[in-house]
Image: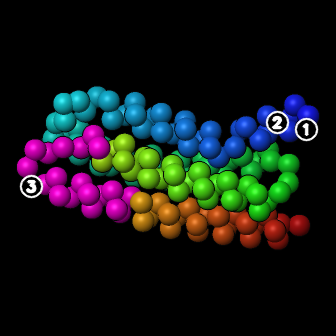
Amino acid sequence: MNTNRITTFLLGPELSWLIMYGLALLLVAPNQPPTEAGNVRLESLAWYVLFAAIILSFAPLYWSQGGLGWWMLRIGIAGLIGITSLATAFCGAIDYHDSRNSGVGTLWIMLVIFGVIFLFVGMIGVSLYLKFRS
């Protein structure tokens, strides 16, 4: 395995998700202690960061050197772990100190469900595009 191939392997979707998780941690940090304005901001930001992370996880396909099935498997596994991690990071930083906290669990479920749907639709779309782009 030459150096270029190792670099391509290391610059995969896992790195994309780690970068976005780090960004999420930076975005939730100012909401300590949780404030109502900060909670509302995080509820909105969670969606943008999640969908940006999903789109960014497909970027390594640009420099990949073949093996579409292997890359899709990596994107899928890293995506599932990343989606749940991002949802947990955002929802863990939201606390209204009243009955509205029950909605935070619902937000987590919605982030995970819509994130997984968007990820798999993206995987199918990108796979079809790469297969038939000739």
Q: What residue does disc 2 label?
A: 6
The secondary element bearing badge 1 is classed as loop
Q: What residue does disc 1 label?
A: 1
Q: Which mark is residue 74?
A: none
Quadrant (top left/top right/bottom left/bottom right) for the N terminus: top right
**Residue at x 35% of width, y 63% of height:** 110
What is the magenta range? 92-111
CB within 8 Å, label 2 to label 1: yes
Residue type at the position of mark 2: Ile
Q: What residue does disc 3 label?
A: 99
Left or right side of 134 for 86: left
| Image location (x, y in percent) of residue 91 | 30, 48
- For the rendered model, the colour scheme is rainbow
Structural distance between the alpha carbons of marks 2 and 1: 7 Å
| Image location (x, y in percent) of residue 86 | 43, 46
Q: Earlier in the sequence, mark 1 or mark 3?
A: 1
Looking at the image, the residue that sits furthest to the front is 1
Disc 2 crowd rating (10 Å Cα; few below 14, some 14-19, many 20+) is few
Report the front residue among 102 and 51: 102
Residue type at the position of mark 3: Ser
Left or right side of 126 for 94: left
Disc 1 crowd rating (10 Å Cα; few below 14, some 14-19, many 20+) is few
Question: In the picture shown, does residue 132 fall above or below 68?
Answer: below
Quadrant (top left/top right/bottom left/bottom right) for the C terminus: bottom right
Question: In the picture shown, does residue 17 fall above or below 30?
Answer: below
CB within 8 Å, label 3 to label 2: no
